[in-house]
Image: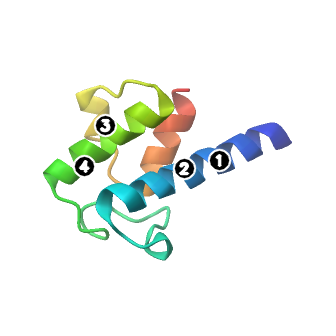
Amino acid sequence: MAKIDESDKRIDERVKEIVCDQLGVKAEDVKPSASFVEDLGADSLDTVELVMALEEEFETEIPDEEAEKITTVQSACDYIRNHL
């Protein structure tokens, strides 16, 4: 069980780093409930680039209909965990 928790923690940390890099926000602003648009100031292009960065980092493909549901930091972490 500890292995899964450690893996989840690494995923969460990496997603947070990607969000900071892509959106130019401070790490302390990137909370699990933070909305990319409302809380972190992302526009539609930012969200597309964010999804592309997540796909590249985690070597997965996120279909457009799923990408539209990834609106918060937590939803990004959950999607990645469930699709690795």
Q: Which mark is residue 52?
A: 3
Percent coordinates x, y for residue 48 in the rendering: 22, 43
Is 34 located above or below residue 1 in the figure?
below
Note whether residue 1 is visible. Answer: no
Nearer to the camera, 63 or 17: 17
Percent coordinates x, y for residue 49 in the rendering: 25, 44
| Earlier residue among tags 2 and 4 | 2
Q: Which residue is mark 2?
A: 14
Q: Determine whether label 2 and label 3 are within 8 Å by CB.
A: no
Callout 2 secondary element = helix
Callout 1 secondary element = helix
Q: Residue furthest right?
A: 2
Percent coordinates x, y for residue 12 in the rendering: 57, 51
Disc 3 to disc 1, how far (Cα)? 19 Å
Amino acid at the residue labelled 3: Met
Percent coordinates x, y for residue 42 in the rendering: 23, 61
Q: Determine whether label 1 and label 2 are within 8 Å by CB.
A: yes
23 sits to left or right of 78: left
Disc 2 to disc 4, how far (Cα)? 17 Å
Q: Which residue is mark 1?
A: 10
Q: Determine whether label 2 and label 4 are within 8 Å by CB.
A: no
Q: Quadrant of the C terminus?
A: top right
Disc 1 to disc 2, how far (Cα)? 6 Å
Is 44 located above or below residue 3 in the figure?
below
Amino acid at the residue labelled 4: Thr
Q: How is the image coloured?
A: rainbow
